[in-house]
Amino acid sequence: MEDITKNTILAFGVGSAATAAILTGMYFLNKETGNVPGFGALSCPTGLTHATLDECAECLPVSRETSSALWALMPRDEDIPARGEWPEPDSADRKATSVKKFWNQLTGEQQEDILRAAKKEGWI
């Protein structure tokens, strides 16, 4: 795996494996932590398990950068299952936009920003 990462870095002339992974759209998980190198290593708290990306972006007092990152991760409408009449916290439409699903794609700073805001608002 290191050879692939080194070759990718050399091919793109970038300084880190995380940058190369972003540029190529390939992500190499760290075997020990299960996270993508260069991205946040915090685990998603249980209080945010059923929160959606758009809920966090709209309802939490997060930075503009974090809000933009949350909206950028939002799947297209066509990729979100239809909402039921009475959507449950674990319904298919909420799972498709769950913060937990995309948590490891946020940077450590973005994760900390969300955690700080969720604590402030009493979500966790």
Image: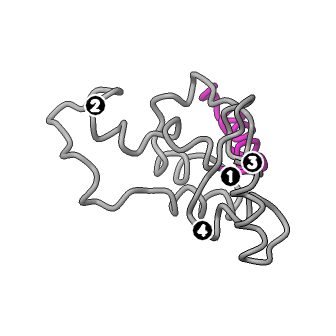
Secondary structure beneath label 3: loop
Name the residue tied to disc 1: 62
Residue 91: mark: 2
Gap between marks 2 and 1, in whole Å? 26 Å
Q: What stretch is highlighted in magenta?
A: 106-124
- In this view, the residue in front, 96 or 85, is 96
Residue 113, how many percent across, how many down?
74, 46
Q: Residues within 10 Å of mark 1 (few under 14, many from 20)?
A: many
Residue found at x 55% / y 55% = 70
The answer to whether 50 appears left or right of 79 in the picture is right
Gap between marks 2 and 3, in whole Å? 31 Å
Gap between marks 4 and 2, in whole Å? 33 Å
Name the residue tied to disc 3: 37
- At label 2, which amino acid type do we have? Ser
Residue 107, how many percent across, how many down?
72, 51
Check residue 116 for magenta coloring.
Answer: yes
